[in-house]
Image (tube, rainbow, N blue to C red):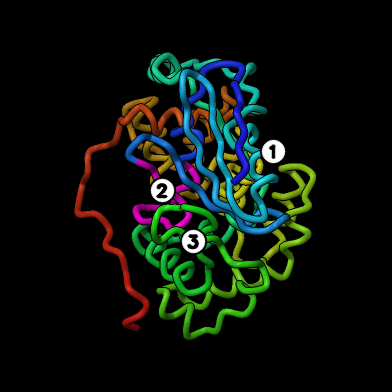
Amino acid sequence: MRERRWVPDGPLDVGLALQPHKRGGGDPTWRQGADGSVWRTSRTPDGPCTLRVSVTAGCVYGQAWGPGADWALEELPALLGAFDDASGFVAKHEVLAEVVRKNPGLRIGRTGRVMEALVPAVLEQKVVGQEAWRAWRWLLGRYGEPAPGPAPEGMRVVPETVVWRQIPSWHWHRAGAEAVRARTIANAAWHADKLEAAASTEELDRLLRALPGIGVWTSAEVRQRALGDPDAVSVGDFHLAKLVGYALTGEKTDDPGMLRLLEPYEGHRHRAAVLVWLTGLRPPARGPRMAARDYRSF
């Protein structure tokens, strides 16, 4: 075991910082303990690791196991948003200002691991969350490896990049991911070294969107998590534009309308979208929720 203590330079909500990396209930890479601690697995440049993060009296306490333990603890402040600069953000809507007052510890962190963010993002393309998360759990159960150290039962580490290129079509089918998403992930895995080495969010956006099957939405979802981009707004999301419109105007809107509403937050549009989500404001439901499909029966 390796361990590290870190005192953030201001308010920090560890749960909010790590929540974006949780992919649905039962995510094999993410657990929360009864004591409030968060367990997370990752495949670092040095190998797999398990990281446990807890907070006591304002001090962040990190414990890590596995070959990637030292790397994970070195990057712990970045993961929790130590380098997130919100100084240029001003909440121009009262509803957002209220969320800022209630959540002073909100920070946007970065994992530094592109493929870990890309694979589940592609699985979530154009499907309901439950469908994507089911596929994520199946693939990690079949191809991931057990989490190092005393991790909670069932935790897994994402497979190496080469594994994503070698998964046979019938296992993608059993996971519930159709051929388009499977090809997108496998193709991206061939370019993983270049993606992981991207020096800026602009470069990563260009590299990602040059790959078949990856557009604006997927690129934004990856950059939010891997690089902590506070401006990477998820254009094309099924829910986001409606939520932004309803929270800020009382009426649902579309993507162009959302971008107009977020224009005053240029440079922090993703941050503003996160605050919208935290308002809890949702437009009234007009019909039944979309059901998860099951490609395994096709």
* Residue 25 is a magenta residue: yes
Q: Residue at x 36, y 58 (%)?
A: 128
Q: Which residues are magenta?
A: 20-33
- Indicate which disc, 3 or 1, sits on the residue closer to the N terminus: 1
Q: Residue at x 59, y 68 (%)?
A: 185
Give the vertical position of 204 relative to 264 (above or below).
below
Give the vertical position of 69 relative to 47 (above or below).
above
On the image, the x and y values in percent for residue 99 come to 40, 20
| 282 sits to left or right of 44 | left
Q: Which residue is mark 3?
A: 156
Which quarter of the figure has residue 192? Answer: bottom right
On the image, the x and y values in percent for residue 179 come to 51, 78
- Indicate which disc, 3 or 2, sits on the residue closer to the N terminus: 2
| 78 sits to left or right of 293 | right
Q: Amino acid at mark 2?
A: Arg
Q: Nearer the viewer, residue 211 or 152?
A: 152
Q: Residue at x 52, y 84 (%)?
A: 169
- Does dot 1 land on a helix, a strand or a loop? helix
Between the C-alphas of marks 3 and 2, the distance is 11 Å
Between the C-alphas of marks 2 and 1, the distance is 21 Å
* Residue 285 is a magenta residue: no
Q: Residues within 10 Å of mark 3 (few under 14, many from 20)?
A: many
- Does dot 3 land on a helix, a strand or a loop? strand
Q: Where residue 31 is drawn, which disc sits there?
A: 2
Give the vertical position of 29 relative to 256 (above or below).
below
Q: Where residue 74 is drawn, which disc sits there?
A: 1
On the image, the x and y values in percent for residue 186 come to 62, 73
Q: Nearer the viewer, residue 127 or 111?
A: 111
| 251 sits to left or right of 44 | left
Q: Which quadrant of the rendered structure holds the C terminus?
A: bottom left
